[in-house]
Image (cartoon, coloured by chain):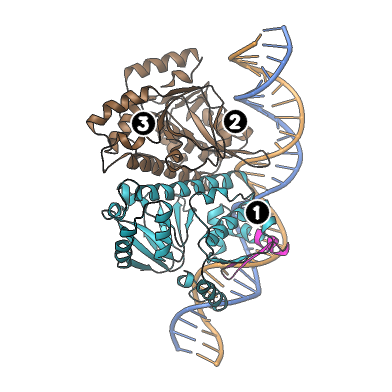
Chain colours: A brown, B cyan, C blue, D orange
Amino acid sequence: MVDHFIRKLRQGGALGAAAELSLRKSLDRRVRLFGAREDLFRPGDRPETVCLITAGIACRYRLLPSGQRQITGFLLPGDLFALRASLDMPFDHYLASITMLEMLQLDRSQLPSFCEPGSGIGEVLRRAMALQLAISREWVLNLGQRNAMERIAHLFCELFRRLQAVGLAIENRCLLPLTQIDVADAVALTPVHVNRMLMSMTRSGWLTFQRSVLEIHDMRRVAEVGSFDASYLDAATTPEPDTAQLKALFYRSGETEADLGIQYS
Amino acid sequence: MVDHFIRKLRQGGALGAAAELSLRKSLDRRVRLFGAREDLFRPGDRPETVCLITAGIACRYRLLPSGQRQITGFLLPGDLFALRASLDMPFDHYLASITMLEMLQLDRSQLPSFCEPGSGIGEVLRRAMALQLAISREWVLNLGQRNAMERIAHLFCELFRRLQAVGLAIENRCLLPLTQIDVADAVALTPVHVNRMLMSMTRSGWLTFQRSVLEIHDMRRVAEVGSFDASYLDAATTPEPDTAQLKALFYRSGETEADLGIQYS
DNA sequence: CGTGCAATTGAGTTGAGTCAAGGCTAGTGG
DNA sequence: CCACTAGCCTTGACTCAACTCAATTGCACG
C-alpha cells in the first residue's frame, strides 16, 4: 500500500531517510475509500491533493455531446493521479472508480517538505507524468493503427504488465475486474465486437477473460498480435515480484469472486 | 523566439528578475537549425537537453512493424520538448521536423540555476507535460469516438488555436505546412479519405486548406463538427495576440509560398 | 423468483479502406 | 527556357472490417 509510494519516491531519489518516517506517519492519516463505479472527479474540479491508489482500479474517461464514452486510461494500485493538484489546474475529464477503491491523499502544501532539498518530489511527479504520457501516446497508436483484435491484445498486455510490475499478477494470471463494455470503451469498439474478438481469442487458446480474471495462455502470441513492446512502461517502474501474502489474497478472491475490488492490493 | 520561453517561465512563476538576464544570454548561444523532414530523435535516444521550438513545426510519430505511421502530436513554436532530458529517460518514439526548424537547447545541468529557489523550472516542466498529456488524451478521444470529418475538424481547431495562442494566426488564417498525408497519419485515416473530407468541407464553405494555409471560414461550424472545446489548451497557455512584424512575415510567405517553414516565427 | 445488467450469437448495413488512374506543381538538369 | 521527374492531390469503382439491430442466455442480487 503505502509501500508502493515509498518505493516510487526512492526511485526518484527524492527520499531522505529522515524524511521517510514523517512521511509514513502523515500518509497513514489520509486514507480514503470509494465504492465501485463512482466519479471521483469531474471536468472543472480542482483537486486539493495528489492521490495514490493503494487498492482497486479506476479509469479516466471523457464524454462526447452524443453520449459516447472514451476511456483514456486505467489507474492501478501504485499509480499516482490528480497530479494537477500540484499545479492548481482543473480536471478536464472524469476520473471514476471501477472497483472499490482505497487511496492515499498527499496534501499539496506538504509535498515539498517530504523531500530532500534539491532532488525532490518534483522529479517523482514528473516521472509519473512522463509514464502517463508514454501510455497515452501508446493508446493513440493503438486506436489509430491497430485493428480490433490487435487493440484488445495490446490493452491486455499493457494491463497485465503493469499489474505484474506491482506484484498483482501470478504466473500468467491477473485480476482485471473490467466488463467487456469497459474494454470496448477503452479500445473504441462496440461491446458486441469486443465479445466476438474475445471469443475468437479464447477459441484460439491465446487467453481467457472471464469473471474478472485475465489469463494469458500464450503471451508470446498475444504480444505479437498486439505488437506489444513493454519498454515504454519500464521507464518509471521497477518490477519487484511481490509477496506471498498477495498471492494468498489473489487465490482467495479468485475463488470466491466476491468483493474482488478491494481485496486487490 | 526566446521570448516565448521567457513568457512561459514567468507564467510558472519561476523567473527572478536577476535570473532573466543570465538566462537570455545563455539561451542565445544555443540555437540549432534543422532542415525539413529530418528525424531529430529516434527511439532509444537519450536527449542531453530540453528543447524549445522558436520557428517551424515538428511532430512525434511511431511506427508499427507493418510500416504504418501514427503521428502522436505536433510541436509548434513556443513548445518545449525532450523534457525527458530532465529525467534521463530515453525516447520511445520518433521526433521529426516537418518544416525547417529553429530551436533552443536548454542544458539539463543549467536548468535549476535559472530558477528562484523554491518555485522553479520544475513547475514549468510539469505544466508543459500536463498540457501535452491533455492534448494526448484529447487525441485518444478524437481517434476513438469521432468519425472522419469530425476528427479532421477537431485537429484543425486544435492547431489553429495553438498557433493563435502564440500569435501565429491572423484573423481566421494560419500557416500550417502539413501535407494531407501528414493529416492522415495524425487522424488515422487514409490520405484518400482525408482528401474527400477536405473537398467536402471546402464545398460546404467551412474551411480551406491549400498551399500550407489553413483558413477557417466558419469557425463556429467547424468547432461544432469537431466538438471542440478549447478549455483543455488554456490550462498552460495565455493568448497574447502577437506583433505586426509577424503578420508581415505571414503575408509575405503566404504569397510566395517558399520556405514557409523557417519564416514561421 | 423476478429484475436488470452483462455476455453471446446471427443477419444485414455502412463508413472508411483499397486499388487504380489522372492531373497538378515545383524543382532539376540539360 | 523548357522537358522531365517526383511528390502530392483528386476522383471513381469496388471491398470489407466493424457497426447496428435484434433476440437469447446467463448470472448476481434483492
Local crowd size for mark 2, using a 10 Å CA cut-off: few (<14), some (14–19), many (≥20): some
Q: Chain of mark 3?
A: A
Q: Secondary structure at mark 3?
A: helix
**Which contiguous range is marked in magenta?**
B197-215
**Tags 2 and 1 touching, CB below 8 Å:** no
Q: Are marks 2 and 3 on the same chain?
A: yes
| Cα gap from disc 2 to disc 3, whole angstroms | 25 Å
- N-term mark: 2 or 3: 3
Q: Nearer the viewer, residue A154 or B148?
A: B148
Image quarter for residue A121? top left
In this rendering, would B162 be left or right of D13?
left
| Residue at 46 percent of width and 44 percent of height | A138
Please state the horizontal and vertical placement of residue A253, each as a whole percent of the image.
45, 15
Q: Which mark is residue A181?
A: 2
Please state the horizontal and vertical placement of residue B29, each as a whole percent of the image.
30, 67
| Cα gap from disc 2 to disc 1, whole angstroms | 29 Å
Residue A265's place in the image compared with D6, above or below, is above
Identity, as a three-letter code, of the amino acid under mark 2:
Ile
| Residue at 35 percent of width and 25 percent of height | A26
| Cα gap from disc 1 to disc 3, whole angstroms | 41 Å
Position of the C terminus of chain A by quadrant: top left
Q: Secondary structure at mark 2?
A: helix
Residue where numbered disc 3 is placed = A165
In this rendering, would A69 be left or right of B2?
right
**Tags 1 and 3 touching, CB below 8 Å:** no
Q: Secondary structure at mark 1?
A: helix
| Residue at 43 percent of width and 59 percent of height | B7
Identity, as a three-letter code, of the amino acid under mark 3:
Ala
Please state the horizontal and vertical placement of residue B241, each as a whole percent of the image.
54, 64
Q: Nearer the viewer, residue A238 or A150?
A: A238
